[in-house]
Amino acid sequence: MRIGLNTFLYASPFTTKSARLFARFSRWGFDTVEIALEAPGHIDAAKVKAAADRAGLAIGSICAAMGPGRDFRGTAAEQRTAMIYLRGLIDQAVLLGCPSVIGPVYSVVGKADAVPAPQRKKEWAAVVRNLKALARYAERKGVTICIEPLNRFETDFLNTCDQGLKLVAAIGSPAVKLHLDTFHMNIEEKDLAAAIRKAGRQLGHFHACGSDRGTPGGDHTDWPGIAKALKAAGYRGDVVIESFTPDVKVIARAAAIWRQIEPRRDDIAVNGLAFLRKALK
């Protein structure tokens, strides 16, 4: 398994100039970088790929930023906006030599409310219809979409591994897999390791984050159990550190990071990488 770092720890938005971070990530020992791309036009893909190549980093994934107006269960206009954005990410993934687009690609983050059963059924159908269309586009482009359940405070649509597997099955595309994140799982799953084993071959991407959104390993998460479960599931993909600090104001506000969780944000990257190297060997 390769170990990567999500760029939200250092930049929002990520632009072509942000690629200067790659040399630092490589020097620390990361194998891959996950680019959180808030708009496809924020980067010149050729220049970003060249910077990654020079640093010896693979661009392992593009992280979707499902902000306001991007919602496959919203209005017709919001659904069109989400489709244009996500197709744009897939196009950039091709240019970057990146195999996957990941994240909560079904709905705007922060939409969390009690939804009556008839409305939920309607929203489910809309998400499945849109993701089937997006999956066909991804298949043609050779890109995998990895769908991430979030915790209940960030979405009411998809919270657990079971729900994620149901959605993956409903879409029924070889280009669609499940994406699990330890932070969200810590809130929603009764047994993180059991959920990983249940995902099995459908697990396409994995985020490693401390239970408090801090450094993997500096928390109460059962990392030995997670490592065993990933191996039992036959997982060979990237394990990406996705943690946040107050330093990047936009993301701190969106992720409710109101305090300094670690002394320095570099600690999250450097110490998290060292811990995961040992835990996953």
Image (cartoon, grey):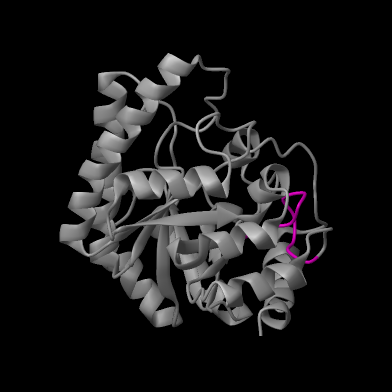
Indicate whether residue 208 is drawn in magenta.
yes
Front residue (pair 127, 215): 127
**109 shown above or below 34:** above
Query: Given the current orientation, which residue lies at the most extreme bottom position?
Result: 281
Q: Nearer the viewer, residue 193 or 279?
A: 193
Task: Say which residue appears at 26% left-offset and 21% top-offset.
Answer: 77
Q: Is residue 60 left or right of residue 190?
A: left
- In the rendered structure, does residue 234 fall within the stretch colored magenta? no
- Residue 108, above or below 93: above
Give coordinates of residue 56: x percent, y percent. Answer: 44, 83
Residue 159 percent location from the top left of the image: 57, 39
Front residue of 243 and 100: 100
**In the figure, residue 4 lies in which quadrant?**
bottom right
User: Residue 281's image quarter?
Assistant: bottom right
* Magenta region, residue range: 207-217
Q: Residue at x 52, y 25 (%)?
A: 111
Residue at 77%, 59% (x, y): give it: 264
Place of residue 231 in the rendered image (x, y in percent of width and height, measured from the top left): 59, 77
